[in-house]
Structures are given as C-alpha cells and as structure tokens.
Image (cartoon, grey):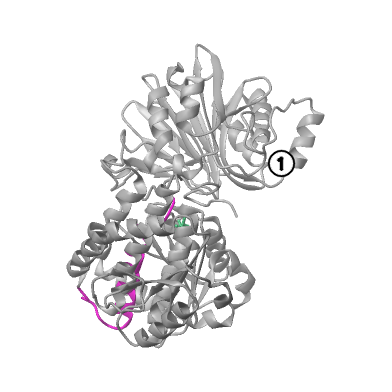
C-alpha cells in the first residue's frame, strides 16, 4: 500500500521522482522520502507527513544525482515517524531500499542480523531488507545477485527497489505479491509500483512476475527468474495518458473522476464481443459460481449476483475477498470464480484468486488496471477502460463495473448487442446536475453524527455503497442496509432529524420502500429520496433520470458519490486522501 518510484537517467532525477511520487501518493500518505547517489555519496531525505510537506521541509527537489528512488508510506510495522519513513539504508550506508509489502519473518531475520553486528535505526520490517542485501552485496559485489539472494530470505510480500552507493549506474528491484513495473524510457529507466509514476516519460512497461528480480541502467533492463536465469520480455504499451493522471481544473481527483462518468460509462461498454462471450460461456458452464471482491467492487459483485439469480436463474455466491479462504473447500475443479477489482492488486482478492486457481477453479476477472496481478493471473479478463482512478474513493470504477457486469450478464442471457451506452451517458450527465441540491443537503446535515441508507432488491448494494462512500470521505458514521431490515433493529436509532437516504426507483419494490420511508418519517427521520419519482414522504428529493432497470445503480451512485465528496469538503477533510486509507490495499 505504499508508492514507489525509482529512476536511473542521463539527467538529474530529483524532479522526475518528485513529480512521480505525487502521482502515486494515493497509495499511502503517512510519510515520504527520497534517496539519491551523487559522487559516490548516498543521500537520504525523509520524514512523516504528506509529500508536499516533506518536500518543503527537507528540500527533496534539490537532491543531486542521476539515480534515485522515492517512497510514500502507508504504515504497517512501526508508527508514523521520521525514522520509519523510507528509504532505509544499511548500517554501512552501502545499500538503500524502499519497500511495499510486509516481511512476515522480520523478527527472526532482525535477531540474526543484530547478532552479526548490524545496527538498526527504525522499527520497520523493511529495514532488514537493506541489511540482508548489504551482506549479500559485500559477498558478491553483484547488485542483481545480491538482491535476489537477499529477498529469497523474506517471507511475506514485497516490491522492493534497491540502490548501491558505489554503483550509481544501476538500480535493482524484486517482487512477490506486490506490484513492480519497469518503465522503459529513452535514456531513462524506471521501477515503480504504478504506471502513473512515470506515465509522462514513457508508456512502455514491463510487469515483473512474482519471484523475479530486475536490474536497470539508464538504457538497459535485465530480468532474472528466481533461479537467476535471464528472462526475456518485451515491453507492452499502456493506454493511459498523462492527462488521465492530472486533476485538470478540478479541485480534487475525486471530483474530476465523478464528473468523468458520462464518458467512462461509454468507454467501459466498448468491449471485445469475443471476450465477453468467453466470459459468459464460462459462467454458463460453471459447476458452481462464486463472485469475490472487496469494498466498492464487492457491491458491484452483489449487483452481478442479483441479475444472474433473477434473470439468468444461475446461482452465484458472493463472498467478500478476505473471507473467501474460509469457504475454500467449495472451490473445486469445474467451478468459476469471478473477481472484481479496480486496482487488480488488492491482497485479499489476490489471495482468494490464488487459492481458487490452486484448486483448479477458472478465474474470470473484471479489472481496471491492465497488467495488474489480477489481470495477468486470470483465465478471462475484461477491462473497465475508465482510465486511472486516483481518488481513494472508488467512483467511476464502480459505474464502469456495473456497465461491464451488465454486458456479461446480458451475454449470459444471449443478448449479444445490448446497447444503451449513449443513453446511459446522457442520464449520468443529467444526474450530475443534482450537485447544487446535494450541497444544500450537506449544509443541512454536515454536523449530524449518523447517516443511514436503505434500499430494496437490486438497489440494496447501493445502500451499502452510499454508506461506505460517506464513511470513508466524510468520517460520519453511516450504515446501509436493505429497507426490510430497519424494523429488525436499526429503527431504534432513528430520532428526530436523523437523515435517512431511501434509494427507491420506480419498479416492483417502489411501494414497499415508500412504506418504509413512511415508517421512518413517523419516527422523526428526515427522509432523503433518491428516485425518478417524487413523493411527499421525502423531506428532500434528489431526482435521478429514469433508465433501463439494469442501469439504475449507475445513476443512483452519482448523488451518493457527490454527497460523500461535498460532505468531505464541508468538513475540511481531504477527499482524495482520506485518513488511514490507501487506494490500493496490497496488504491483508
Ligand atoms: O482495487 P479494488 O477494487 O480491489 O479495491 C477494493 C476496495 O479497497 C475499494 O473499493 C475501497 O473500498 C474503496 N476505497 C471504496 O471507495
């Protein structure tokens, strides 16, 4: 859950690193740091805080050298302090490392290193890597061999980038269960946790596989497998552009990404028909079908289950990714696992996918990041095509997931050309006009301690999604549930003025949800209706356009996303970087 960028170039790298570091800051933002080598001197500047604050306090932009690496941290082992920020140097300052992941066996490794006389300066698990590689480098004087030998002693997950004080011409890296990508530029080479880190400099990438190690120079890449044997791999071109990774004129990435949705629901719908059909065929033929994902992607998974059950009469179990291993005995040969993930790197999802693959299950994934671990390890892949999502809150990726899920379910139902994307795009643009009304809601309820979201049937996952979005961006306690559940406990919490969002499109459940809204009003709640039809029970009403029933979650998501975003801004939070969170959850 940390952001890494390393670069070897024929020009000074500090500016390049800083620019890249800011673009991967969404991966973690507790601390930041940079190391460069200039004139055989290793310099490290780092501290606790956001990149811009550390840049200002430590003057990272003035660091000299044509080789360097930078890191933005999401703390796991060791509190958020200057000492625990990366990079970490070995005691002889011969080696410096940055790391994303968790070293499970760091305590025993540290004991062994201390016994050998190594001195530790931080409380992190990462620091052992620097000392281990230093020992190997003293022995071999070969950066790549030393890196490979060092990481072989680690248990856990790692994407690690290493610099050697007496070798300013090279940088090494290695990975297991955390992403590490080579960016192949002209006179500059990168190692990064994310394509966004170097997207302005090159769009040519090589994704490392688990247990591989790499050495880069300013114009060369050497990849080796765990046995040290050379691996040949040509770079791929990524479709993302620099403009995708900037805020443009928006105050925040989150707002930009919310407003991109009229376009991204269309781009998500542009899929290779053959791939969609293969995906659908796998579902049709599955002995048993499981869907897995985390957070917002899980909500998209619930929507998929609903349509598969109701319309295709296919039974599917949806399991939160982190819990999938508890049900592993049901994952058997002939089963299919559908995995949904924006990042394609979520540790819980990857663990479930690997468990399933190991049991002979076919994995079909819906993912945004091409080249991600999930995309590479799946049997069938459909991409969301919605461009990079930088805001920690999933917004455009959720609506893109709904679009792709619908394409798959339609194909399962034999509808190969469902259409409707342009109409949906217009409806999303129309839904975005509710922003003014949402801001009035924010003025009325920004000080409330609790919010509730309810819905029925196909919309129920939207209640969960509305609550999740509000919690993570505004830090207001929020709960989402099927409206039918209210009377089984939660109604006891409703008092005068409690805001309750009722998501209630016209359709089979409309009347029952209205009855629930009446029950809420009778107990003093301020009912906020999100629907295509107004009703006097709603104290506030957010109209969303009427669309085909399968697309209602897309238009309903818009006011829920805006509510969370505007609430975050009103409460002086940073919507792009909500506290304690990170975009890509690569630890379990
Ligand atoms: O990259 P993924 O879709 O696998 O991420 C899953 C969750 O971590 C993610 O959806 C998270 O819940 C979002 N911050 C919600 O807005």
State yes or no: residue 406 in magenta.
yes
Toward the viewer: 416 or 578?
578
Q: Residue at x 64, y 30 (%)?
A: 130
Q: Is residue 126 above or below residue 263?
A: above
Q: Quadrant of the C terminus?
A: bottom right
Category of crowding for the residue at label 1, using alpha-carbon neighbours closer than 10 angstroms: few (below 14), some (14–19), many (at least 20) = many
How far across and how far down the image is residue 162, in percent?
55, 30
| Residue 293 visible within the image | yes
User: At numbered mark 1, what does the secondary structure look like: helix, strand or loop?
Assistant: helix
Q: Is residue 577 above or below residue 510?
A: above
Q: Which residues are magenta?
A: 392-419
The quadrant where residue 78 appears? top right
State yes or no: residue 247 in magenta.
no
Residue on which disc 1 sits: 106
**In the image, farthest residue toward the right:** 115
How far across and how far down the image is residue 127, in percent?
66, 33
Q: Is residue 555 left or right of residue 452?
A: left
The quadrant where residue 561 appears? bottom left
How far across and how far down the image is residue 235, in percent?
35, 42
- The answer to whether mark 1 is within 8 Å of ligand 1 is no
How far across and how far down the image is residue 284, in percent?
39, 82
Q: Is residue 179 left or right of residue 16?
A: right
Toward the viewer: 477 or 186?
477
Labels in figure, total: 1
Q: Residue at x 58, y 76 (%)?
A: 492
Q: Residue at x 53, y 66 (%)?
A: 357
């Amino acid at each position: 859950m940390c952001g890494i960028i390393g670069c070897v170039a024929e020009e000074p790298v500090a500016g390049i690193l800083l620019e890249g570091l800011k673009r991967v800051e969404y991966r973690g933002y507790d601390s930041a740091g940079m190391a460069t080598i200039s004139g055989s001197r290793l310099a490290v500047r780092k501290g606790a805080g956001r990149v811009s604050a550390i840049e200002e306090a430590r003057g990272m932009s003035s660091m000299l050298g044509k080789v360097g690496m930078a890191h933005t941290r999401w703390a796991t082992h060791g509190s958020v302090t200057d000492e625990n920020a990366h990079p970490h140097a070995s005691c002889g300052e011969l080696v410096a490392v940055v790391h994303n992941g968790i070293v499970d066996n760091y305590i025993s490794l540290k004991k062994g290193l201390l016994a050998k006389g190594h001195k530790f300066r931080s409380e992190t698990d990462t620091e052992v890597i620097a000392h281990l590689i230093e020992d190997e480098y003293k022995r071999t004087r070969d950066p790549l061999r030393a890196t490979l030998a060092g990481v072989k002693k680690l248990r856990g997950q790692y994407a690690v980038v290493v610099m050697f004080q007496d070798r300013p011409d090279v940088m090494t890296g290695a990975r297991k269960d955390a992403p590490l990508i080579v960016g192949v530029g002209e006179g500059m080479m990168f190692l990064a946790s994310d394509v966004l880190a170097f997207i302005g400099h090159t769009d040519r990438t090589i994704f490392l596989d688990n247990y591989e190690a790499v050495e880069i120079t300013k114009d060369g890449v050497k990849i080796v497998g765990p046995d040290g044997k050379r691996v040949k791999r040509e770079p791929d071109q990524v479709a993302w552009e620099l403009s995708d990774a900037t805020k443009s004129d928006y105050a925040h990435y989150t707002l930009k990404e919310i407003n991109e949705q009229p376009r991204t629901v269309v781009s998500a719908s542009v899929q290779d028909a053959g791939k969609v059909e293969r995906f659908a065929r796998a579902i049709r033929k599955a002995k048993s079908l499981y869907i897995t994902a985390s957070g917002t992607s899980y909500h998209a998974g619930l929507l998929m289950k609903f349509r598969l059950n109701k319309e295709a009469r296919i039974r599917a179990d949806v399991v939160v990714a982190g819990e999938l291993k508890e049900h592993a005995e049901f994952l058997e040969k002939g089963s299919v696992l559908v995995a949904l993930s924006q990042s394609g790197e979520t540790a819980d999802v990857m663990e479930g996918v690997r468990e399933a693959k190991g049991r002979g299950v076919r994995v079909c994934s819906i993912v945004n990041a091409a080249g991600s671990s999930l995309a590479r390890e799946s049997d069938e892949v459909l991409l969301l095509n919605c461009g990079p999502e930088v805001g920690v809150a999933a917004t455009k990726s959720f609506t893109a997931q709904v679009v792709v899920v619908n394409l798959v379910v339609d194909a399962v139902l034999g509808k190969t050309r469902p259409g409707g994307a342009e109409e949906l795009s217009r409806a999303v643009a129309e839904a975005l006009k509710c922003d003014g009304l949402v801001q009035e809601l924010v003025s009325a309820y920004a000080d409330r301690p609790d919010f509730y979201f309810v819905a029925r049937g196909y919309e129920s996952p939207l209640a969960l999604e509305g609550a999740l979005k509000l919690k993570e961006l505004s830090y207001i306690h929020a709960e989402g549930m099927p409206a039918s559940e209210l009377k089984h406990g939660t109604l006891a919490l409703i008092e005068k003025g409690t805001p309750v969002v009722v998501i209630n499109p016209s359709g089979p459940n409309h009347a029952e949800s209205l009855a629930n809204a009446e029950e809420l009003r009778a107990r003093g709640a301020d009912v906020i209706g999100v629907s295509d039809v107004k009703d006097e029970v709603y104290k506030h009403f957010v109209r969303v356009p009427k669309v085909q029933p399968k697309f209602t979650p897309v238009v309903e998501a818009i006011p829920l996303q805006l509510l969370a975003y505007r609430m975050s801004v009103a409460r002086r939070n940073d919507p792009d970087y909500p506290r304690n969170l990170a975009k890509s959850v690569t630890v379990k």
